[in-house]
Image (cartoon, rainbow, N blue to C red):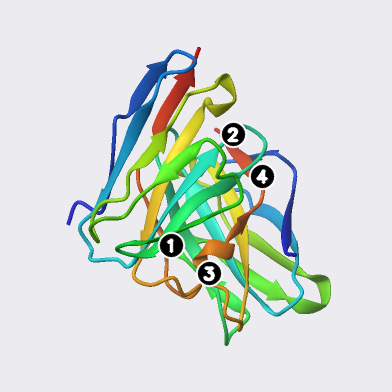
Amino acid sequence: NAGVTQTPKFQVLKTGQSMTLQCAQDMNHEYMSWYRQDPGMGLRLIHYSVGAGITDQGEVPNGYNVSRSTTEDFPLRLLSAAPSQTSVYFCASSRTRLGTDTQYFGPGTRLTVL
Amino acid sequence: AQSVTQLGSHVSVSEGALVLLRCNYSSSVPPYLFWYVQYPNQGLQLLLKYTTGATLVKGINGFEAEFKKSETSFHLTKPSAHMSDAAEYFCAVIPGRTNFGNEKLTFGTGTRLTIIP
């Protein structure tokens, strides 16, 4: 198993541009999530999904969209990038949404918005 | 609402010395508690977790943590530090035994561990 994969590893955008961060998992996990990691703030949840066709907002959803058309993929879309979205983005998945199920994290995407 | 406090954003220990990383939590219901490790330029990896049962939890790489309800703490320890332990460590909490799931996972701000040769 490849686990959780993310592309790209690095991205530089200009303010106002849009882009999609890709996330895929090959473990047949129901639950997938996106976090952003900023210095001194830990990880904060952006959006999550409990299964194909079902998504919901996390702590910091503004400026981001998600969809879950398949079990495997959970892309994160930045609609109009802003410098405040400069961050490292992590995708994670777990077998179910239960808190007893371990989340597995991808390697991250480092995004810079100029 | 739950929250997690990690005391010390940077901790340095000598190789072979005891590692102690502190974590205190607040939760309105009995919590599930986690420690994650992040090596440079990598994602987070679960070190150990407490959900129910024995309050002393053993994890990977020789780490362990003890859930102390009276102190609302879940400190991470390792008897003898190794150079490979240099990383950032995150404590996290979910309100347990409720309908909440992984969407309620709240992270602390992290502690960067440096090992001195």
The circle on residue B40 is none
The circle on residue A38 is 2
Q: Amino acid at mark 1?
A: Ile
Q: Amino acid at mark 4?
A: Thr
Q: Residue at the location (48% across, 39% down)?
A: A64
* Left or right: residue A112 compared with residue A20: right
Packing grade of label 2 (10 A; few <14, some 14-19, many >=20) is some
Residues tagged by mark 1 and mark 2 found on one chain of the structure: no
Q: Amino acid at mark 2?
A: Asp
Q: Secondary structure at mark 4?
A: loop
Packing grade of label 3 (10 A; few <14, some 14-19, many >=20) is many
Q: Residue at the location (61% across, 43% down)?
A: A42
Kindly give the residue lying farthest to the bottom in the view shown: B53
The circle on residue B109 is 4
* Residue B86, visible in the rendered structure: no
The circle on residue B60 is 1
What is the distance, in whole Å, between disc 4 and disc 1 at their CAs?
21 Å
**Mark in front: 4 vs 1:** 4
The circle on residue B49 is 3
Q: Amino acid at mark 3?
A: Lys
Residues marked 2 and 3 touching at CB (< 8 Å): no
**Mark in front: 4 vs 3:** 4
What is the distance, in whole Å, between disc 4 and disc 2 at their CAs?
9 Å
Residues marked 4 and 1 touching at CB (< 8 Å): no
